[in-house]
Image (tube, rainbow, N blue to C red):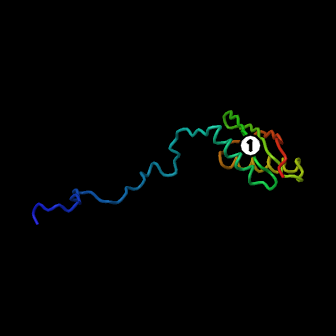
Amino acid sequence: MVGARTGAAPPRRGHTDAVPDTPPHAEGRDPGGRTTISPLVIEKSAARAVREIPGARRARSRAARARVSGEIVLLKLRIGVLYPRSAREVAVRVREHVGRRIERTTGKRVHHIDIEIAELVR
């Protein structure tokens, strides 16, 4: 039918639907640019990692604070410990786990982690 609408545009000459390959000069090359990770993201990640440790809970108010200086992270955590677990043992596990998790997810080095036991939880 002449003049009937099909809803499809006619194909363009010389056009293919294939996605062009990556240019040869760009393969294996870092495109450059800067990636910035907010201290708030690091704080959320640290608070979440605390919950992954048996016997540890994040504190009710501002569970984590992070300071970032270049590639170095300093953390302060406020946690609760389930009674009757050893606060010292839980703190050691939290420090190790949170440090590994932040380093793995951000690529930054955790210099140290201060932990405040804010509460005992039954």
Judging depth in this view, the residue of 71 and 20 nearest the camera is: 71
* Residue 48 point in image, percent of width and height: 70, 49
Graded by Cα atoms within 10 Å as few (under 14), some (14 to 19) or many (20 or more), the crowding at tag 1 reads few
* Residue 7 point in image, percent of width and height: 23, 60
Q: In which quarter of the image is residue 60?
A: top right
- Up-down relation of residue 70 to residue 102 (above or below): above
Marker count (numbered): 1
Judging depth in this view, the residue of 32 and 6 nearest the camera is: 6
For this orientation, the residue located farthest to the front is 122
Residue at horizontal 83 percent and vertical 49 percent from the top: 121
Residue at horizontal 51 percent and vertical 47 percent from the top: 29
Quadrant of image for the N terminus = bottom left
Disc 1, SS: loop
Give the labeled residue for mark 1.
Answer: 60
Residue at horizontal 48 percent and vertical 52 percent from the top: 27
The disc labelled 1 sits on which kind of residue?
Arg
Residue at horizontal 87 percent and vertical 52 percent from the top: 83
* Residue 47 point in image, percent of width and height: 71, 46
Judging depth in this view, the residue of 82 and 31 nearest the camera is: 82
For this orientation, the residue located farthest to the left is 2
Q: Quadrant of residue 8?
A: bottom left
Judging depth in this view, the residue of 54 and 41 nearest the camera is: 54
